[in-house]
Amino acid sequence: MDSYVCTIRSTSNLFQKLSTTLSPTLSPPQPRTSARLKSKRSITLYNQSLYQNEVSIASTNTKTPYHEDVLPNWDAFVKRQENNDSLTSFTISNVELPPMPFFSDKLVPILKNSANHLVSLELSRNVLKNIGIASVAALLKSLRNLVSLDLSRNQMTNEAGIKLISKSMKKHPSLFHVDLSYCSLGESISALSLVLKGSEKLSSLVLDYNDFKSDGMDLISKFLASHTTLTALSLRHKTETKEGGKTLTQSFLKPIAQTLERSSLRELSLRGSDLTLATKVESKVLCDLLMHIDLSYNRIGVQGLKNVVTYLQGNPPLTCLNLAGNSFRKEAGASLMGVLKRNTNLAHLNLRHNSFSKASVPCIVDALKNNSTLLTLDLTDNKIKPKSGGRKELVKNALFDSISLQSIIDSNHSCQVYVSDNNWGNKDTHEVEIRKMNAFGNKGKTIRYKLALAMFTLKTIPFNPLAFQHISLELMPRLLDFVQQQVGYDGYGKNIWKVNRKERGKNPVLSRIYEVMTGWSMMPSLFERGPGKIKKKAVKKRKHAFAFKEADDEEWTPSKAN
């Protein structure tokens, strides 16, 4: 689809990329032009293909300030979107909007025009500074189908505005997820109370890095105990101070940990919160009711790891566990991998950014060969490096042991293992291709692809037609179909193998078919009847006996009297 993209660049890095997607039903975008400004800023308009019905105006690094020379670009964007009534997602992040009433007069009508389709709205990173939280609260009343609202990284200290947004959130019929991270809600207990009051119907709430104190955590714990609709909560925080002789982490967690078993929460994130899980209070976050726990980038030590292992040994209903960035070493790997051999519920385990090395590879291989329920295992950014670092042994011994047909069958066919993001430095393991095969979700299909890769593409297993000589007649069509496949050739496995190859010289497919058929033990039985046509036996026709009493009209002969 044709899209309109406005890019603002600056030699002083003050301006970052600003991109907007337009609907294909509108007039075509302007041709590429360039205009040099006095401050060495340039404005470039060009075409680009982006996602349909989604608008994103965002700067990922330094905030993009507003300049009057950019106003024509904003006006052009508004003009192209004014007739679009099918937007599903709208994002403005880290970009300073033109002064009011630009938002209320120009952007709000665009959003209201797509009120029946808009499900996601993001106004993050100081966007509210120029538009005010009250205008967003008024906008929510019109967006009745909105599902996700992201107002993160905005200073929400105006209690009058927070009261309005809280009331709009509470009355909204379909709002499901709200992100209010980095909003300084910890500075005012009354502001937090208003936010929680408006979150009574939400299912997912993000309150990361708001500098809550003990009174704020008590308020959140009471909210969790009394509301049964909230199923996902993120409370990431970073504190190094002390309060009342205890670390703030313990004071922070105690009311939440005591409430978990009585709440409706199923997903909890405490990423980067200085947790050790060594104390009784902290270990209570390992609740048997949770299905998703994020404990990444904490300080989980030996005792904390023991508590995690004990928790997993109980086979809780937990399906996703994130332990990235906890500096785990060989001993931790042995403990975690040992419990994976018996756990049948965990489906996703994130162990990236730890210190696992080649010494941890044997226990990881053993766990993968004895676990069929783990679907993803992330080991990227560890010390399992190519060649001498154990990466080759991990992929080969656990996922794709191509020594023989039986070794491939005995490999793990369900887990997508991420040791790195590509095959760099270790192309002969085909790590990415094997990961894609394990993502099929069909064990039989995965095994067939791995066998085809080993026998016909990589040729690490010699093709021996005698191995199939006693196959049954019912399976022969499947075998003939299998021997014609080569991963990476003629489009077979095109989503797995990047480059499509073509075999030169003689046709290997016909040769394999011939060898299989001539070596098949049941082939002679197909020709047991010999040549010629099959003679059919003559069938005598019976005459109708409705006028006779005799049962067999062929044996009846007329008498002299007749």
Image: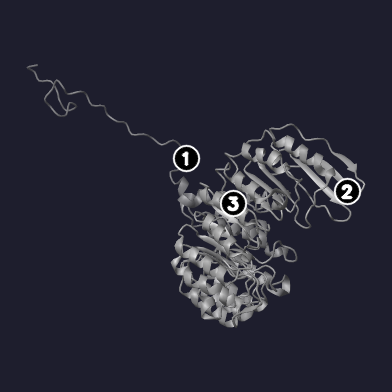
Q: Nearer the viewer, mark 1 or mark 2?
A: 2
Nearer the observer: mark 2 or 3; the answer is 3
Residues at marks 3 and 1, CA–CA distance in whole angstroms: 88 Å
Q: Which residue is mark 1?
A: 531
> Is residue 346 something one can see in this rendering?
no
> Percent x, y for residue 227?
46, 60
In the displayed structure, does residue 169 sit left or right of residue 225?
A: right
What's under tag 3, amino acid-wise? Ile
Residue 18 % position (x, y): 77, 48
Residue type, mark 1 in image: Pro
Snapshot quadrant of residue 418: bottom right
Q: Residue furthest right?
A: 38
Crowd class of label 1 (few under 14; some 14 to 19; many from 20; radius 10 Å): few
Q: In the image shown, does 45 or 151 lie closer to the viewer?
A: 151
Earlier sequence position, callout 3 versus callout 1: 3
* Residue that label 3 marks: 165
Dot label at residue 523: none
Give the Cα separation between the discs numbered 2 and 3.
Answer: 37 Å
Q: Secondary structure at mark 2?
A: strand
Q: Residue furthest left?
A: 561
Q: Indicate the secondary structure of the residue bearing disc 3.
A: helix
Q: Quarter holding the C terminus?
A: top left
Would you name the residue on which mark 2 appears?
A: 41
Disc 1 and disc 2: Cα gap in Å? Answer: 88 Å
Q: Please, what is the three-letter code of the amino acid marked with disc 2?
A: Arg
Q: Residues within 10 Å of mark 3 (few under 14, many from 20)?
A: many
Which of disc 3 and disc 2 is earlier in sequence? Answer: 2
Residue 163 position within the rendered picture, expressed as x and y whole percent measured from the top left? 58, 54
Picture quadrant where residue 298 is located: bottom right
